[in-house]
Amino acid sequence: MKKKLKNISGEYFEFEVENKDGGGVNVLEAGYIITPDGDFILVPKDIEHSKIFSEYINKYLVNKTNTTYESNEAMIALIKVNHVVYYGLRMRDIVNLYDKNGNQDGVGLLILPENYKEILTKEQKKSINILLESNKSIFGNREKMYIRIRETLSGTDVEKEEFNLFLESMEEQIERKN
């Protein structure tokens, strides 16, 4: 659905977002941008990450000329302005996972801004939780796929248990305020 989002200057622009409340968010999608307001910008299965990332970052940063970024360039630009980026799976990725060595493990990559503990908004935390909750298999107490959580692309991996405690502590703080 189209929604009015705020750019870096606080003005509005329109962009397609995923309905996070209607169960539309799924770790098996190709990817997402999670905005500071907690909105999900979907990377559709048939479109390159760089295209969606570039369209969004140009509107968000109010670029006078549209810049075409490579995926990693755009991702770095997004996390520098406090967005979260998720790289998921595409069907061609799933096919490539079944290699001759028997590797069948899918990996998602959740990339957080530097100093995420101080920077993430409560809306982003809720949205990240929605994304991570979508990774639970209906066939028992396990994950659909492994998700690596990183602080910046070149930073360190964040332990999943530690990150879940961080998200839970924030939810408790929010509930106490309400």
Image (tube, helix red, strand yellow):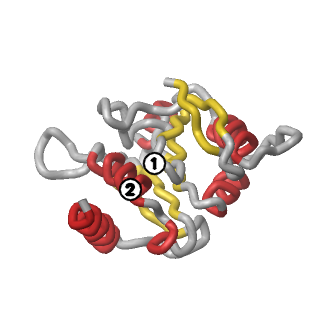
Of residue 109 and residue 169, the one placed in the foreground of this image is 169
Which quadrant does the C terminus fall into? Answer: bottom left
Marks 1/2: CA distance? 19 Å
Please tell me whether residue 144 is drawn above or below residue 17 in the rendered image. below
Disc 2: which residue = 147
Circle 2 sits in a helix, a strand or a loop, which is it? strand
State the mark number for residue 24.
none
Residue 3 percent coordinates (x, y) = 54, 30
Which residue bears the numbered disc 1?
38
The reply to whether residue 34 is visible in this rendering is yes
Give the farthest residue toward the right: 65
Foreground pick, 97 / 117: 117
Circles 1 and 2 in contact, beta carbons < 8 Å: no
Q: Is residue 109 above or below residue 68?
A: below
Identify the residue shown where x is 49% and y is 70%: 116
Q: Residue at x 32, y 47 (%)?
A: 130
Instruction: Identify residue type, mark 2.
Output: Ile
Tell me the element at label 1.
loop
Res 102 visible: no
Q: Residue 152 location, x and y as percent?
A: 57, 67
The amino acid at mark 1 is: Gly
Q: Position of residue 16 (x, y in %)?
A: 56, 29
Tell me if 177 is positioned left or right of 158 in this view: left
Side of 116 relative to 80 (left or right): left
Quadrant housing residue 124: bottom left
